[in-house]
Image (cartoon, rainbow, N blue to C red):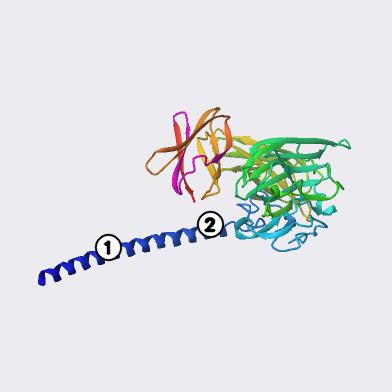
Amino acid sequence: MNKKLRQRNRIKLKLSGKLLMVVGALSIVLTLVTGWLVYLNMTQLSHTRASGNGDNGGNQLNRNSEIISEFTWEKDPVTHSTLGPDAISASSAAHAAPGGRSSTRGLAPGTNGKDIHLVIPSSPLFDQDGIDISIDYRRNESSGNFFSRGSSFNFGMNKGFITIAYRVDNKKGGYESVTASTDYEIPVDDVFRNYRFIYDPLNGKGEIFVNNIIVWSSSGSPLTSMYWKNAGNIIIGKEMNGGGKDIPVFDNLVIRSTGSLVPLAESLVNFMIESDGQGVKIHWSSAANDHADYFALQRSINGTDFTTIATIKANPNLADGDEYVYTDKPASSATIYYYRLRQNFRDGKFVVHPLSAIKLSVKKELSIERISPLPFNKSFDVSYFIPADGRVWIQLTDSKGKIRSSETYQVTQGKNVHVFRDQHNLESGTYTLNLIFGEQKVSSKVTKI
């Protein structure tokens, strides 16, 4: 009898131990799942609105901008703007629907298969010398236009590749056209990405960004304005019906100015920059020292985003031809720096003089600059720098070091963008992205959900 009782007790103890192990394992799994959901939620909260952080950086690309129009499509009717003039028409089925970027609502085409064709009326408000257009888009079709204005401007895609066409003043009473089909193919997946075009009239440069990664640029003549005054209505979603799916394809449209040109002041006699071994030596002279209040010296690493690095008080007693001198010691690893001078006068007026560039002999190595989105589902974009022309390998390895994906491309020196597509149906988890160029290798962690 005692023997049977002892056997029953041993069986109960074993069962209790197993039950505790199962409960403990379930608790660990529940904790991990809860933590992962919290992480995903916090990640989504960091990318909310294009006017703030919805474009993965807010207004960092165009710090001196002013928002002139904004649509978030959080509620119907979709013709109502968040800022600026309302649209005057759209497809009768177009509506605000759940499923926009970052768990918000967005602009969906409806069920009738018609193009969205949201029309914003022509206005002098949009007749800017330069423009900054930012919109979140999820691709479900082959071709169409994000933003169009008559025959003067079009920002969209053709067979999946981003396209751009715009006009600039040729200073002879006419215009020159800039038309291009970029090498960036928009992935067909469920991911919203931010597509942004910026034209800066001060330096004459047009640029396209995807999630703040530059994918195309065109350099024109400085101090050149866009040629599109009175060009007609603006159309969002021309020839776009979302591939017949009634889910949001657009979200967070923000239109910004990039500043207006002012007449070039003749008072600046010279503006010169040179490397002196210790930094960048900048010197200039002015023929209007008695009218000037101060000079603001500004620096940029991309020719678009400028930061004031020094303010120098004007000296009214300085003789014509005598120079102001300032030595700048940049802390970043950029190889090219841009400088410009803002001359402020006592009557409150000012003029920003054209920029100048200098190239420093700083060698930049192989690097991964940005990966987006993270975590990823079916694809992600990786922006990287290659120090010379050649062949690069892009590998994805699992936690055991096993190569799960390997691709190789012939690329040119400088910044490049690669779209990684999960063609092997990888399991969820953390992987290592390896970028290999010759004998150099850099790596970064990526997570698939």
Q: Is residue 415 left or right of residue 401?
A: right
Residue 43 numbered tag: 2
Q: Is residue 443 left or right of residue 362?
A: left
Residue 109 position within the rendered picture, expressed as x and y whole percent measured from the top left: 72, 54
Label 1 belongs to which residue? 18
Residue 261 position within the rendered picture, expressed as x and y whole percent measured from the top left: 79, 46
Mark 2 falls on what kind of element? helix
Residue type, mark 1 in image:
Lys
Quarter of the image for the N terminus: give it. Answer: bottom left
Q: What is the residue that sits farthest to the left in this orientation? A: 2
Residue 216 position within the rendered picture, expressed as x and y whole percent measured from the top left: 67, 38
Q: Is residue 411 left or right of residue 344?
A: left
Is 432 in the magenta? Answer: yes
Would you call the spot at circle 1 few (<14 residues within 10 Å), some (14-19), or many (20 or more)? few
Q: Please say whether residue 92 is visible from this viewpoint.
A: yes
Image point 62% across, 39% down: which residue?
Answer: 337
Foreground residue among 219 and 73: 73
Kindly check if marks 2 and 1 are in contact, taking CB atoms under 8 A apart as contact: no
Foreground residue among 190 and 225: 190
When the figure is inspected, residue 60 is found, relative to residue 4, above or below; the finding is above
Quadrant of res 214 = top right
* Nearer-N-terminus badge (2/1): 1
Residue 272 position within the rendered picture, expressed as x and y whole percent measured from the top left: 68, 37
Foreground residue among 344 and 59: 59
Q: CA distance from mark 2 to mark 1?
A: 37 Å
Image point 73% across, 40% down: which residue?
Answer: 164
Magenta stretch bounds: 418-439
Quadrant of res 403 = top left
Q: What is the residue that sits farthest to the right in this orientation? A: 173
Mark 1 falls on what kind of element? helix
Q: Is residue 248 left or right of residue 366?
A: right
